Image: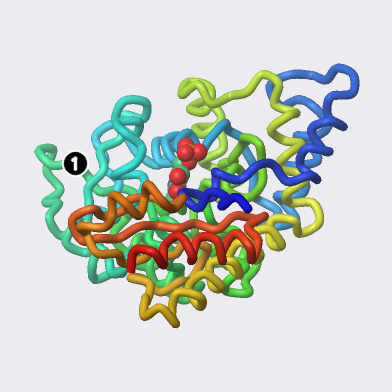
Amino acid sequence: MTTRGFTSDNASGVHPAVLAALTAANEGHAPSYGADPLTAALEERVRDLFGADAQVFPVFNGTGANVVAVQALLQRWDAAVATADSHMVNDESTAPQLVGGARIVTVPSVAGRATPELLAPAFDAYDGTVHHARPAAITLAQSTELGTTYTAAELAALTTFARSRGARVHIDGARLANAAARLGATLRELTTDVGVDVLSFGGTKNGLLLGDAIVVLDPALAEPVARLRKASTQLASKMRFVSAQLLALLEDGLWRRNAAHANDAADLLAARLRPLGVEPVYPVQANAVFIPVPPAALPAVVADAPVLAWDRAAGVVRAVASFDTTEEDVDALVAALGRHF
Ligand SMILES: Cc1ncc(COP(=O)(O)O)c(C=O)c1O
């Protein structure tokens, strides 16, 4: 038996329904740059799921979605506020600055989650003069970089806080599906209904070959996003192939089934680790499990088990389950990890 990858949920392959949709999209020719029938069908489906004003902009990847979406919220003298542990801050190189011209100001989190209290100092520090970057946006990940989630009520409190400080809200939803599946919520309840302005919607981590989307909820952002997507090199000419995949994911609830499966596999992993005396470092609220290991053993653990070295100093590895993770995969991983505890 081979142990399959848990380093990230992009280690997995492509869901068969998504591959079938790609094959079907390969019939004949179609207009380019999103003027095709599959993109039109995706636009309709996104309106069904996020509300009548929602507009979708397929992109190549999550970094691109974040950079374009956050850029659309900022003037050139503005900053966006994010948690210091977020993907946007730590794992997108200088893309927000280089491609988006976006300055990001950081605040601490509690297990990956921001709160109004944690965000407030970033706004309090701004004195309104031209000398300081104006905090004009908040960007939050759902689920967070540490595998935790925000409830709809928590999100509503965050968007209310943002509005009270004159800021807009972006959600990095690379794993929004996992959060929605875990919370038993609709996509709309976690975004449109709580006053989110724009979000990145993950596809690649949930069974696509390649493709994420920006979903604009404030119609005033549609034109900036459309123009910035092109200017930021995220406009696909053969867009029908990205749209076909997203449509397959969104059409009949595949997004939720895939995400729920990955969440369940993460739960199973946490449950199988407990008898070994191993408790995840953060609550398992999506599909990621952060596992404590003795720091001295970490290099051997990552050599032996398909997990990511998350924090070498503290001794933490990350295991992320995918839409196709099996019980055998989990057992093989636990066996490999178990050799090092
Ligand atoms: C929370 C989050 N946002 C954004 C991204 C960026 O996605 P991509 O690697 O497709 O650019 C990732 C990928 O790891 C992620 O985990």
Q: Name the quadrant of the C terminus.
A: bottom left
Q: Could you tell whether 183 is left or right of 123 in the image? A: right
- The answer to whether residue 151 of the structure is visible from this angle is yes
Q: How many marks?
A: 1
Residue at the (37%, 76%) spot, across then down: 278
Badge 1: how crowded within 10 Å, few (<14), some, or many (20+)? many
Residue at the (82%, 38%) spot, across then down: 21
Q: How was the colour assigned to the protein in this rendering? A: rainbow
Q: Could you tell whether 255 is left or right of 162 in the image? A: right
Q: Amino acid at mark 1?
A: Ala
Image x and y of residue 338, in percent:
41, 67
Residue at the (76%, 42%) spot, across then down: 18
Image x and y of residue 262, in percent:
60, 61
Q: Which residue is mark 1?
A: 133
Relative vertical location of residue 19 with respect to residue 313 in this rendering, above or below:
above
Residue at the (59%, 40%) spot, across then down: 212
Instruction: Using the image as rendered, state which of residue 65 and residue 55 is in the foreground.
Output: 65
Instruction: Using the image as rendered, state which of residue 117 and residue 59 is in the foreground.
Output: 59
Element at label 1: loop
Instruction: Using the image as rendered, state which of residue 242 and residue 325 is in the foreground.
Output: 325
Q: Is mark 1 within 8 Å of ligand 1?
A: no
- The answer to whether residue 219 of the structure is visible from this angle is no
Q: Could you tell whether 336 is left or right of 33 in the image? A: left
Image x and y of residue 157, in percent:
39, 72
Image x and y of residue 29, in percent:
85, 17
Residue 214: which quarter of the image? Answer: top right
Relative vertical location of residue 172 with respect to residue 162 in this rendering, above or below:
above
Residue 72: which quarter of the image? Answer: top left
Looking at this view, name the residue that lies furthest to the right: 28
